[in-house]
């Protein structure tokens, strides 16, 4: 028998159970951290970039939420003749 | 379920089950290869952690042209080689020529190494330098092809063959010196 393969089988057998699980949990934690950082960058990245841009004297690129984009007066009661009373 | 199916499912849903399936399929094999390169359990364990983090963070780059296992093992060897280079403890692994090459090298058949008892093999490996041990284990324990070893270590195939030939000859010499009188 090729005892090099026996060495390989020993290594494989030694990395099971709790040892394997401990490393898996560490990897999962690192992946969660990476995912969190990516989400933060995705969420705040454009706003941060725009802030820096404006601070540097540029025009804002990101539209802030505007609930009245056309500056129209709201329709008051009695001005709309289509309303059937 | 094929590796590629799990990879695609993981990319789509980032589901923990897909992660665990791939991890359980490859963790021990990756650890064994890290042991080939780094020789210390704690270092191999740390490397396994880094390798899997790297694998799952760059899963989007895997296009399926090579087998998933080939891709995983190339990440494994490359990361271990980076670690060795950073620690600078085994420069000779990357050297193209040995410092003191013998004039004639006896051709040792593979069977001479394969037929050693496990305890004898362990003794022989312990007497080799780190780079000699790595080369021998890559070839005979992990079954890595000469061409792949050459490209991983940045050497020519003939340089790897020559180095391997020397290591085999040295291994046999160590073995015979220690065990020939016993058997």
Image: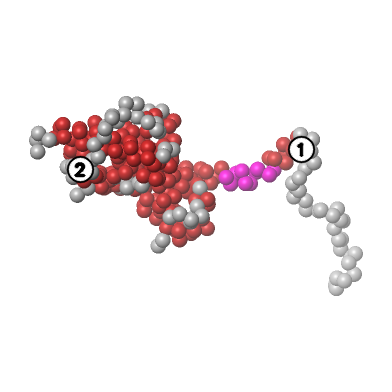
Q: Residue furthest top?
A: B100
Identify the residue at image location x=35%, y=36%. B38
**What residue is pinned by disc 1?**
A54
Identify the residue at image location x=87%, y=61%. A76
> Which of the pair B147/A35 is nearer the observer?
B147
- The range drawn in magenta is A38-47
Q: Which element type, helix, strand or loop, lies under badge 2?
A: helix
What x and y, as percent, mark residue B148?
40, 45
Q: Is residue B116 left or right of residue A68?
A: left
Magenta stretch containing residue A39, yes or no? Answer: yes
* Front position among marks 2 and 1: 2
> Which of the pair B61/B110 is nearer the observer?
B110
Residue A14 lies in quadrant: top left
What x and y, as percent, mark residue B76?
41, 43
Identify the residue at image location x=43%, y=54%. B68
> Which of the pair A45/B24 is nearer the observer?
B24
Check disc 1: other Cα within 10 Å, few if <14, some if 14-19, many if 20+: few
What x and y, as percent, mark residue B128?
27, 32
């Amino acid at each position: 028998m090729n005892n090099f393969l026996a060495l390989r089988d020993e290594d494989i057998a030694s990395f099971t159970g709790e040892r394997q699980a401990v490393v898996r949990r560490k990897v999962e934690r690192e992946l969660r951290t990476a995912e969190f950082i990516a989400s933060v960058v995705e969420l705040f990245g454009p706003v941060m970039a725009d802030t820096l841009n404006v601070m540097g004297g540029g025009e804002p690129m990101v539209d802030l939420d505007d609930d009245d984009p056309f500056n129209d007066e709201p329709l008051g009661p009695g001005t709309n003749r289509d309303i059937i009373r | 379920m094929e590796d590629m199916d799990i990879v695609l499912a993981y990319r789509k849903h980032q589901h923990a089950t897909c992660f665990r399936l791939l991890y359980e399929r490859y963790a021990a094999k990756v650890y064994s290869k890290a042991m080939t390169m780094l020789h210390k359990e704690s270092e191999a364990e740390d490397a396994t952690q880094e390798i899997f983090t790297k694998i799952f963070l760059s899963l989007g780059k895997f296009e399926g042209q090579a087998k998933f296992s080939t891709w995983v093992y190339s990440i494994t060897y490359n990361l271990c080689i980076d670690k060795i280079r950073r620690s600078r403890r085994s420069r000779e692994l990357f050297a193209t020529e040995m410092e003191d090459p013998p004039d004639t090298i006896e051709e040792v058949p593979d069977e001479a190494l394969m037929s050693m008892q496990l305890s004898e093999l362990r003794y022989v490996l312990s007497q080799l330098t780190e780079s000699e041990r790595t080369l021998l284990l890559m070839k005979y324990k992990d079954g890595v092809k000469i061409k792949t070893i050459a490209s991983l270590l940045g050497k020519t195939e003939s340089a790897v063959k020559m180095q391997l030939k020397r290591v085999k000859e040295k291994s046999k010499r160590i073995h015979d010196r220690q065990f020939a009188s016993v058997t």
